[in-house]
Image (tube, grey):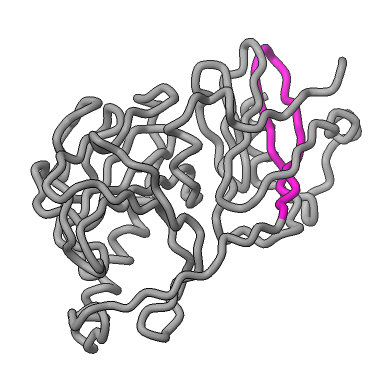
Amino acid sequence: MLGYLRSIALCSLASCTLPTWAQRDQTATISAASGTVVRWSAPGTIRCAMKGRSWAAVQGTCYYPVDLEQTPGTRILISRYGAGSTHLGHITVDAIDYGIEDIVLPDIPQAHPSAVDLRRDARDRAKLGRIFNQREGMPKFTLPLSAPANPLPPGKSFGVKRVFNGKPASQRHTGVDYPTPVGSPVLAVAEGTVVMAEDMFFEGNAVFIDHGDGLISMYFHLADIRVAAGEAVKKGHLVGHVGSTGRATGPHLFFGIRWHNARINPRFVLEEPGKIPSIQSPPS
């Protein structure tokens, strides 16, 4: 059955013909916007799959993150395995308008990067590509995650299309900006392993923590870095302090989440999981 689950994980509705019994079971559905998460709970659930990835359930629940750049109208096949059976469903991706934000950058290198700066950024992207696509371990967290800073004022700007000094950014804003006071401690949101901690061109002083199950938390624009790559951390571990390094107009904390390589709004993992939209299985 696990081998069959892996084969399902590699399917898409456009390219796979599923067995007749599986087609009959494929009635668990939900609609969700890009950048969000849906969940599917059932007693005995142990594994989940979507878009060629398979992972462990978190306390009997499958969480399916929908990437911020996922095309509206896409129908994503998902599966849930447990108690000796595989259940199928799909997520239909809804359109959402996160808005546009015009930002005036001061006279900093990130406002007019040189060829050397862009090569440095390309090296940063290559490192992150390896991190986001690495083998996923067992989850070291439960939901909700703890706050990445204290105090943590309301955040903003997830998903917006940003225009810097009249030039559109290459991608949407993938995290949330919190106007946390300069110098405030920045804290690990759960147990995990630091997979990257260094000064990056656009992100400034940045820390990335792998919490298992493909969940990676990100902390940017820090004034300093207090952890090192390879270091094991617990929930609440000090990783640095709020600053304004990198492409920033002032002190704030950028906090982001990648889950199974999908860019999602962090609020879905900082709030009670019961608030996450749930797939309702059809009656058996």
* Residue at 72% across, 29% down: 279
Quadrant for residue 20, please give it.
Answer: top right
On screen, residue 262 above or below 79: below
Question: Toward the viewer: 24 or 32?
Answer: 32
Question: Toward the viewer: 204 or 40?
Answer: 204
Q: Is residue 221 left or right of residue 2?
A: left
* Number of residue marks: 0
Give x and y (percent) for residue 22: 83, 31
Q: Is residue 13 left or right of residue 214?
A: right
Give x and y (percent) for residue 190: 30, 29
* Residue at 43% across, 77% down: 163
Q: Is residue 213 left or right of residue 9?
A: left
As for residue 78 lying within the magenta part, the answer is yes
What residue span does the magenta drawing correspond to?
76-94
* Residue at 21% across, 28% down: 236
On screen, residue 115 above or below 121: below
As for residue 159 lying within the magenta part, the answer is no
On screen, residue 202 above or below 64: below
Question: Toward the viewer: 173 or 45?
Answer: 173
Question: Toward the viewer: 115 or 137?
Answer: 115
Location of the N terminus by quadrant is: top right
Quadrant for residue 105, please give it.
Answer: bottom left
Give x and y (percent) for residue 57: 53, 24
Q: Is residue 182 left or right of residue 29?
A: left
Give x and y (percent) for residue 33: 65, 50
* Residue at 35% across, 25% down: 140
Location of the C terminus by quadrant is: top right
Quadrant for residue 128, please give it.
Answer: bottom left
What secondary structure predominates along the stretch shown in magenta?
A: strand
